[in-house]
Every structure is written in structure tokens, then in C-alpha cells.
Image (tube, rainbow, N blue to C red):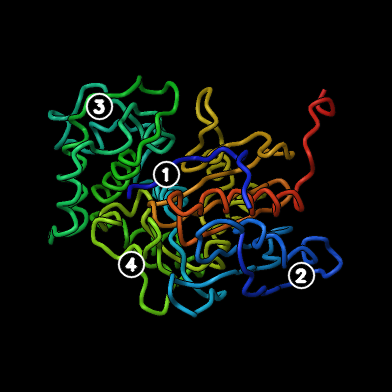
Amino acid sequence: MFTRRDFSLSAGASAFVLAGCASTNADPSRPLEAQSSSVLQDAMAGKAVPGMAAIVIRDFHVETEYFAGVRALGSPAMILPNDRWHLGSDGKAMTATLIAKLVDAGALSWERQLSQMLPDLASTMQPAYRDATLPDLLSHRAGLPENTADMDFFFTFHTDAAPLPAQRLRYITRCLQDAPVGPARGESTYSNTGFIIAAACAEHATGRAFEDLIVAHVFDPLGIHSISFDQFGAANEPQGHVDSRIANQQNDVNPHMFAPAGAMRMTLRDWSRFCIDQMQGEHGRGGLLRTDTYRFIHAPQGETRTALGWGAAPHPMNLRGPALTHSGSDGNWFALVCLFPETGNGVLVVANAAESMGGDAASVAALHAFAATIAEPFEESSNG
């Protein structure tokens, strides 16, 4: 459980059986189309991953959607284009976009300190956190630990019947008493807690739950209607897997209150709508934020390569960037994204298993193969 961090686009891997390929506005003369039967097969070979899917974006449009394997171990049901996938920490970019939307609207401020945004907690939080800002929280630069170290406390939220904002407030009250793991505004120290705190700030400022806010301000305007905050898929949906079994036990997943840090499911097509809007935003054609706001949340903070909810990669996989990257996993699923805003190209890859069954390696391998078809190699000498 919990969700995983930004990824290194360097691992290789290989895979299994291709169930099918759905094509939209695809040019059959392009090499990617000809490789559709091999990319996911090669990625899954020798792994225990039940199913995978991918979307390739070219020139700000979905070019092709690929899918492979089955929805669950022991099931004959194949992966289909409208299936929902757990995005894990890839949802952090969505949380950051919601916060940016509220800043653009004047409900929040990039400069306001945490002690001002959550005044009731100011006296009990560690002094080092009091002047943290939303950019600090959303770029992992507030010095916060990754998660609470008290797993017994964490699991109590599975049975907590309080409203989700109250649960998040209880969670962060405890977390803000933990000692910092690093100085504020220094190196990035990955923190799921920072995103839950940012969501609590939004809830305090608006009086509305994070789930309501992100649907109203991010998903509905983009036509994203497949969103689910339920960590377990229905019987006819893909299931997450861990240790060669379906992940269907309560403590396999994160509690519902964890959504701002990465506990959301949606279709690949809906995820691509969000990603395309992020890239269009840098060209003045975004549907959610001001152009300068898109550019701000995509910019690396300080001397890091961490943006707000994104990794900012100059040349991922030795390809010409800049690119926006991230990975996500709750231990049962794996999801990767790499976007090239300058060209409007990108790749999304998902698997319904993670590290314990090779879903991470399979996803990285597929991403490498697809990304090489949409971005030029980086040659350092060409940049002088």
C-alpha cells in the first residue's frame, strides 16, 4: 500500500499475450502501428502480470490504445479499452492541478504559510512545517516524511466512519508532529503526506471535500466521468494483484482518505484527457488553468527535478525533452506516464500488478518501447 514515487526511466524488461489493439486516428504507415503486436508481449514475457494497457498520444490526440492479457488471475475476461485502472501516485498531478485551480480562483495562495492555512494545527505541528507553502508540499520540499510510520494508526482509517475531510485532518494532525526528514525547500524528500495536507488546506478554504472539489474543478470540465475513489474494482473490472493473488484484502489497499496522494481509478482514455490538457495548457489552450499557471506547476522547484505533482525530466530515457514524468503504485497496480509538452506527444502505460509480480519492470519496458517512437534521441553535442 501507500503509493510509489517518481521513477527512473532506465530499467528494462520483457512479456505475455496480446489481447487486442484499439486504434483511434492512427496512421497505419507509422512504425508504432506495425509494432503493436509485439510491444506489450515483449514487456510481459517472463512476468506474472495478468494484464496491461497503454495509450500513445501524438500531436495532442490519442493515436492508439493497446491492451493485453486478462482482468484477473483465473478469469477468462480480457482487458478492454473502457476498463478502469488504478493510477496510484500519477493522481498527484491531478491534485496539484486542483490546488492550482483554487489558487487561480483566489481561494488559496501559493505564498500563504501552512500555519495560516490550517491555523487550528499551528500550535501542535513541528515548527519546521509552519512556514511551508503549497508549492513546498506539492513538490516534496516541505521536509515531511513519506508517510506515517505508525501502520496500526494508518489502518484505523479503513473503518473510520467520519467524513473524509475529518479523517484527513486526524491523519495530518499526527503526521505534522513527526520530526522533519530534511530541511524545507532543499532536496526533494518524497511525501504522500504533503499531498494530503494540501488537500486538507483546500477543504478548509472551501468547506468542501477533496473528492467533490476535484470532480467539480478538474474532472467534469475535462469530460472525465469514469473516476472512482473505490480501491477495489467491481467484479467485471480489472483487479489489482499482489504476491500472485488478487489484492482483495482490506489492508492490501490504502484507505479512502488517501485519495489526494494517489488513490483514484479511471479509464486510460479519461487519463489521456487530463494529460492532453496538461500539454495544451503550456500552449495557451488548456481548459482548466491560466497558461502561466500550467507552466508554473510543470517547472522544477529549486535545484530539483521535481515540479508540482510531476517529475520534470530534461531528457528522459535519453530522449529529447523536456518531459513530465511520474509513476504510481499502491503495491497492486503500476502506472507510468511520460509527456512531451512541446510536441504534444506522450505515453501512458498501466498494469494490474506491481513489483511483486513484475508489473513495474514490464511497464517500464513498454514505456521505453513506445516512447522511442514519439520522441527524438537526445544528443548532447547538438545543444552545444
| Residue lying at 24% horizontally and 33% vertically, measured from the top left | 116
**Disc number lying in front (2 or 1):** 1
Tell me the tag on residue 26.
2
Write down the residue under mark 1: 4
Tell me the tag on residue 181.
none
Name the image quarter holding the C terminus.
top right
Q: Position of residue 240 (x, y in %)?
A: 40, 63
Residue type at mark 3 is Arg
Tell me the tag on residue 232.
4
Q: Position of residue 188 (x, y in %)?
A: 44, 28
**Most extreme residue toward the right, as rendered?**
29
Q: CA distance from mark 3 to mark 2?
A: 51 Å
C-beta proximity under 8 Å, tags 1 and 4 = no
C-beta proximity under 8 Å, tags 3 and 4 = no
- First in residue order: circle 3 vs circle 4: 3
Q: CA distance from mark 2 to mark 1?
A: 33 Å
**Disc number lying in front (3 or 4):** 4
Q: Is residue 85 above or below residue 280?
A: below
Residue 240 is left or right of residue 175, and the answer is right
